[in-house]
Image (cartoon, grey):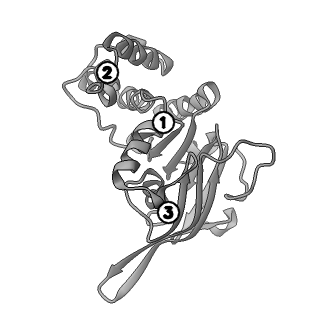
Amino acid sequence: MTETSPAAPMPGSAPPVVSVRDVWKLHKLGDEVVKALSDIQLDVYPGEFVCLMGPSGSGKSTLLNMIGGLDRPTKGTIVIDGQDTSKITESQFASLRHDTLGFIFQSYNLIPFLTATENVELPLMFEPYDRKALRQRAVDLLNLVNLGHRLDHVPTKMSGGEQQRTAIARSLISNPKLILADEPTANLDHKTGEIVVETLKDLCFKLGVTVVASTHDPTVAEHASRVVRLKDGQIVPTEGIA
């Protein structure tokens, strides 16, 4: 794990997958304005595993939601895969999410009556996609996360770690460039969480996928290629976090 300036240029590298510039998120509560994010600057490059860390309320999940388009900044710009998301419609952002982003949630968000294979297929199940090819891709992804022995199991027949690895496989079904993971180990014990984090790290190495994860878990930070720390809605140096 290395800790560098969060927006520092990387000479000779490809353009960033994500570029966050001057991003603020303000909420009005009565007469008070709450700064959920303040002047965020961040570049994330292809193949990085970036960990957003900080105490509750620090803004890490808010920043993740801004990058994923689940919320919009009050001001500032976020460029994803070369597209300035401040200049596109919600429909265009939905298309960008479909083609470029994969999401992993702490609660897994699997459909309880579908098998692992069917859950992985789900994001493309209702699209004009060759059914046999889709099934094979789902199986290949489950094998990639070492779940080839759970293809026909429903979530209730799998452990928490197996469910989260199924969610990781599902996030890859559209061949995204960027995976956004919100507290991916929050519901897992330490050993299982480490397996999940190692899976994410392997994906960066094997597939060149970029991962940005928000977390409280130091295990995630230990495996990340870079840690970005937040406090009170701002990116701070390591020593700025108690």
Residue at figure coordinates x 73%, y 57% from the top left: 8
Q: Which amino acid type corresponds to the residue marked 2 in the rendered image?
A: Ala
Towards the viewer: 24 or 191: 24
Residue 45, given in percent of the width and then of the height, sits at 65, 45
Residue 30, given in percent of the width and then of the height, sits at 29, 86
SS for tag 3?
loop
Q: Is residue 163 left or right of residue 5?
A: left
Q: Which amino acid type corresponds to the residue marked 3 in the rendered image?
A: Pro
Q: Is residue 188 left or right of residue 230?
A: left
Mark 3 closeness class: few <14, some 14–19, many ≥20 residues within 10 Å? some
User: Which comes sooner in the sequence, label 1 or label 2?
Assistant: 2
Q: Measured along the vertical axis of the image, is residue 114 above or below residue 228?
A: above
Q: Measured along the vertical axis of the image, is residue 2 above or below residue 223?
A: below
* Labels 2 and 3 touching (C-beta < 8 A): no
Image quadrant occupied by the N terminus: top right
Mark 2 closeness class: few <14, some 14–19, many ≥20 residues within 10 Å? many
Residue at figure coordinates x 47%, y 60% from the top left: 87
Q: Which mark is residue 177?
A: none
Where residue 115 sits, quadrant-wise, is top left
Mark 2 to mark 3: distance in Å? 33 Å
Q: Which amino acid type corresponds to the residue marked 1 in the rendered image?
A: Gly
Q: Which residue is mark 3?
A: 55
Q: Nearer the viewer, mark 1 or mark 2?
A: 2
Residue 187, given in percent of the width and then of the height, sits at 37, 42
Q: Which residue is mark 1?
A: 193
Extreme right residue here? 11
Mark 1 to mark 2: distance in Å? 19 Å
* Labels 1 and 2 touching (C-beta < 8 A): no
Q: Is residue 134 left or right of residue 217?
A: left
Q: Is residue 187 left or right of residue 193?
A: left
Q: Which mark is residue 116?
A: 2
